[in-house]
Image: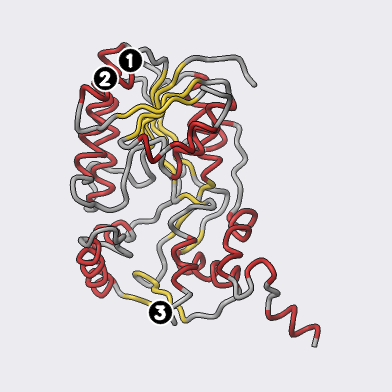
Amino acid sequence: MASNPGLVTVFGASGFLGRYVVRALTARGWRVRAAVRNPHTAHELKVIGDVGQVQLMQANLRFPNSVARAVEGADAVINLVGVLFEAGRQTFESLHVNGSDVIGDACAAAGIRNVVGVSAIGANAESESDYARTKGEGENVLREHVPTADILRPSILFGPEDDFFNRFAGLTSFAPALPLIGGGKTKFQPAYVEDVANAVAISVTRGTTGETFELGGPNVYTFKALLQFVLDTIDKKRFLAPVPWFAANMMGFGGELSGALPFVKPFLTRDQVENLKVDNVVSETAKGFEAFDIRPETIEAIVPSYLSKYRKYGQFHEKREIVDDAL
């Protein structure tokens, strides 16, 4: 293991990306203070790294005193907190903007300059999408407090627990068609969660300098191409149904109504529809994975390994063309 570079506080450590970030940090020798709302639900983090290398601590971004305690004595801070849809008090404004403000203020008060904020490609304080707008505003308020903070903007993340490929593969279990929102022309550049986690860990290990990075995988796909990739991977045939924007907005409204129910995650919201109108790809002039000497993985190399459970016979399933050739 690498020598101990110090103590890093990670907000949002129990999330999808957070668990990979904690692993990447411990591999580089960091002691990790995992600041989470509900420590009793994040015990799996404590078995990462050496005994005692990861410490759980309760912190809620709505309570500045808890955030100040979480950063006390830390050498670096990472903010991974974010939501894709709003639920109750977990709003875009409260987490992306106010949360970044509270964390930035606490870091400034503690004299911490080594800070990473994970945002998203498309973050823009002028965006029509509330998600993208608040992500952009969150970047701005963090930099107002800590000008040396690095901002990392990944495209959609893929990995065994992702909410994109798993969601659409799961949808094939009961749906005869998959929706092509806006005709399926929106472009994406999916990034492997482990690659993004390593970029975060590298950023704090070498010390942040106030730069912005956009992290996308090696290939660009349309939404339609990604859904077709899912179908090909799990060897299922489903109709790809074009859904015009106005109809997608109606679907989004229905998703919001269902999401108002306890423990129900909306399939789609109107704000997500708005976000889908803009390509989610790395801009030509942006610094990306190459700045961290990371060669990003492709979806073709990673995704099939965890979508096997959606095939008819799981890992023992043989694709139709292979069976047909044998007959």
Residue 322 position (above or below residue 191): below
Q: Is residue 260 left or right of residue 225?
A: left
Number of other residues with Cα within 10 Å of mark 2, as a class: few under 14, some 14 to 19, many 20 or more: some
- Residue at x 33% of width, y 65% of height: 267
* Residue at the front extreme, as displayed: 40
**Residue 244: x and y, percent?**
30, 75
Q: Are marks 2 and 1 in contact (CB under 8 Å)?
A: yes
Residue shown at the point (24%, 53%) measured from the top left: 129
Q: Nearer the viewer, residue 49 or 95?
A: 49
Determine the CA span between mark 2 and mark 3. Answer: 49 Å
Residue under circle 2?
Answer: 68
**Residue where numbered disc 1 is placed:** 72
Amino acid at pointer 2: Ala
Where disc 2 sits, the SS reads helix
Residue type beneath disc 3: Ala
**Image position of 135 (left or right of 311):** left
Quarter that holds the C terminus? bottom right
| Res 269 label | none
Q: Relative to residue 21, is residue 247 drawn left or right? A: left
Which element is circle 3 on? strand
Whole-percent x, y for residue 275 in the image? 30, 56
Q: Position of residue 254 (x, y in %)?
A: 22, 70
Compared to residue 211, the image places residue 95 above or below, namely below
Which mark is nearer the camera, 3 or 1?
1
Q: CA distance from mark 3 to mark 1?
A: 52 Å
For label 1, the crowd category at 10 Å Cα-Cα, with few meaning under 14, some 14 to 19 and many 20 or more, is some
Q: Is residue 113 visible?
A: yes
Taking the image as drawn, is residue 116 in sight?
A: no
Instruction: Identify the mark at residue 241; answer none if there is no mark.
Output: 3
Q: Residues within 10 Å of mark 3 (few under 14, many from 20)?
A: some
In this rendering, would 243 be left or right of 314?
Answer: left
